[in-house]
Image (cartoon, grey):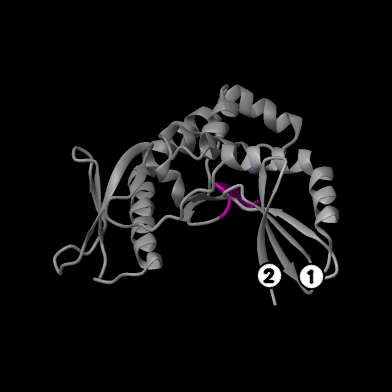
């Protein structure tokens, strides 16, 4: 059985749950509320001391959570904002027989995703990923000719995948790029491609590799930050 109470200690509201447990557990939830699970029979004085001794940690953690609120989960629904090459678009779902492939209208800033009525989040996400893959395919010749001429090395093959890393280069010179690069400003794809092409010279991230990056893409550190930011 769980008994719930609210305590006020030093101006902080504590959501206390008394349960059949042996130890106390203090948690700060993503919305900064404080939850304390405590053994059923423990005294309020003991709880008060416990909270007071953790006061700095509680306040620090709350401040951090309020500064970085959890991102709302993407639903890929009509009206939601997504990005192509760093530009903002609004999603519009369409369910008809004529449109089979996702596409976008740059002037209207609308991404059209063809999905069945009552589609799932997974299906809608898949449709957007298909659009990103098409964008990578459509633009790769431009990126390749630009970056190959900078680095002076050519991959044996280039592929696209929806994966965890932004890019990957294998010993057999095959380069894989993440299709989600199509979300980010084009400079990000250039940076990742130059990085992977540099691996055709230096197959690691040694100081020599970084010197190559400094030479071929002098502001790579800023671009890397842009790439990994939540802005797109
Ligand atoms: Zn690398």
Residue at left 55%, top 37%?
Answer: 153
Task: State the mark number for residue 97.
Answer: none
Q: Is residue 204 visible?
A: no
Could you tell me residue 208's position as x and y percent?
A: 73, 30
Q: Are marks 2 and 1 in contact (CB under 8 Å)?
A: yes
Q: Find the residue positioned furthest to the bottom.
A: 1
Could you tell me residue 27's position as x and y percent?
A: 71, 54
Taking depth in this image into account, of 103 and 89 the one nearest to the observer is: 89
Q: Does residue 62 lie above or below 33 as drawn?
A: above
Q: Quadrant of the C terminus?
A: top left
Residue range corresponding to the magenta coloring: 164-172
Prevalent SS, magenta region = loop
Left or right of residue 152, residue 2 in this image: right
Report which residue position mark 1 lands on.
40
Report which residue position mark 2 lands on.
3
Q: Residues within 10 Å of mark 1 (few under 14, many from 20)?
A: some
Q: Secondary structure at mark 2?
A: strand
Could you tell me residue 181's position as x and y percent?
A: 45, 44
Q: Quadrant of the N terminus?
A: bottom right
Q: Does residue 141 lie above or below 212 as drawn?
A: below
Q: Does residue 134 lie above or below 57 as drawn?
A: below
């Amino acid at each position: 059985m769980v008994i719930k109470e609210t305590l006020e200690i030093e101006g902080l509201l504590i959501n206390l749950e008394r349960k059949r447990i042996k130890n106390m557990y203090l948690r700060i939830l993503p919305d900064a509320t404080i939850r304390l699970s405590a053994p059923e029979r423990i005294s309020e004085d003991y709880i008060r001391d416990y909270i007071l001794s953790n006061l700095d940690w509680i306040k620090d953690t709350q401040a951090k959570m309020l500064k970085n609120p959890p991102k709302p989960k993407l639903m890929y629904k009509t009206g939601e904002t997504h990005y192509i090459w760093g530009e903002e678009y609004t999603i519009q779902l369409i369910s008809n027989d004529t449109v089979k492939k996702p596409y976008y209208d740059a002037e209207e800033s609308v991404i059209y995703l063809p999905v069945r009525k009552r589609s799932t989040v997974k299906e809608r996400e898949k449709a957007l990923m298909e659009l990103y893959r098409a964008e990578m395919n459509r633009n790769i010749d431009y990126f390749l000719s630009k970056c190959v001429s900078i680095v002076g090395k050519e991959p044996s093959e280039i592929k696209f995948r929806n994966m965890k890393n932004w890019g990957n280069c294998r010993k057999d010179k095959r380069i894989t790029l993440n299709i989600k690069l199509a979300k980010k400003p084009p400079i990000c794809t250039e940076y990742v491609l130059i990085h992977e092409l540099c691996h055709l010279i230096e197959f690691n991230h040694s100081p020599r590799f970084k010197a190559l990056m400094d030479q071929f893409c002098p502001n790579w550190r800023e671009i890397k930050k842009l790439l990994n930011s939540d802005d797109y």
